[in-house]
Amino acid sequence: MIIKKGAEAHLFLDFISGKKVIVKERKPKLYRIKELDDNLRKQRVVREARLLHSAKKAGVPTPTVYLINLESTSIIMDYIDGKTLSDLIKERKLSREELVGLLREVGKLIGRLHKEGIVHGDLTTSNMIVSGGKIFFIDFGLGDFSRNVEDLGVDLHLMKRAMESSHYDVFEEGFSAVLQGYRETFEEANEVIEKMWEIERRGRYWER
């Protein structure tokens, strides 16, 4: 059963030995040369699986990868039963303490990723699922491995922009909590945060 159609991939719900799993299948891009497209999709499937595994090793909850199928350019992984952090925030049922606590934990998890040179590539509260008292990071399809401060700064800037647009009513306190948690787990946090502000200033300059 298909549960989501994206620009890069489709998500299907399936069962293996009675256990719910997600099948993420990268779709062909018809505007690309077929051989090039096939190779790119295979590379990205392998990279995403490696990112998920590396993030888990870094102490960031992610879906467990069960199988990579290069023929169908798909990944079979855990189904995480929970709510997206985005939905939880929009429901407005969280107390101030719960909200700040969750976003501080998000910051800690981002710090763990960046400490290990993992760039998520699409840090939004829609790509975080709260389940069983944990925050799971999902969808590393745009991610990469990098320790470049610019790349880490862009990653953090994406989180800031996403929160500004989706959660503007709690943005100021919420993003401060993210940065607080980020500093707690990543020694080079201040350098990346300064780079994030620099990226923002650049963007404002070009928008003039």
Image (cartoon, rainbow, N blue to C red):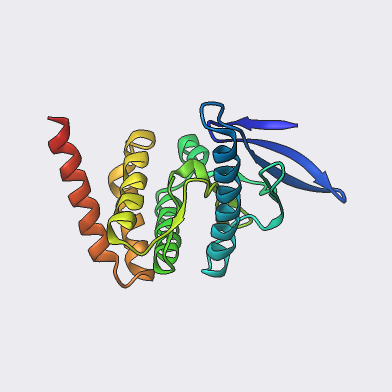
Q: Nearer the viewer, residue 105 or 47?
A: 47
Quadrant where the C terminus is found in the figure: top left
Q: Nearer the viewer, residue 157 or 54?
A: 54
Question: In the image, is residue 51 above or below residue 99?
Answer: below
**x, y percentage for residue 44?**
55, 48
Is 99 displayed left or right of 63 in the figure? left
Quadrant where the N terminus is found in the figure: top right
Is 151 displayed left or right of 134 in the figure? left
**x, y percentage for residue 89?**
46, 41
Q: How many marks?
A: 0
**Extreme right residue here?**
17
Is 111 displayed left or right of 197 in the figure? right
**x, y percentage for residue 12?**
71, 36
Residue at image point 40% right, 63% down: 114
The quadrant holding residue 62 is bottom right
Residue at image point 44% right, 63% down: 113
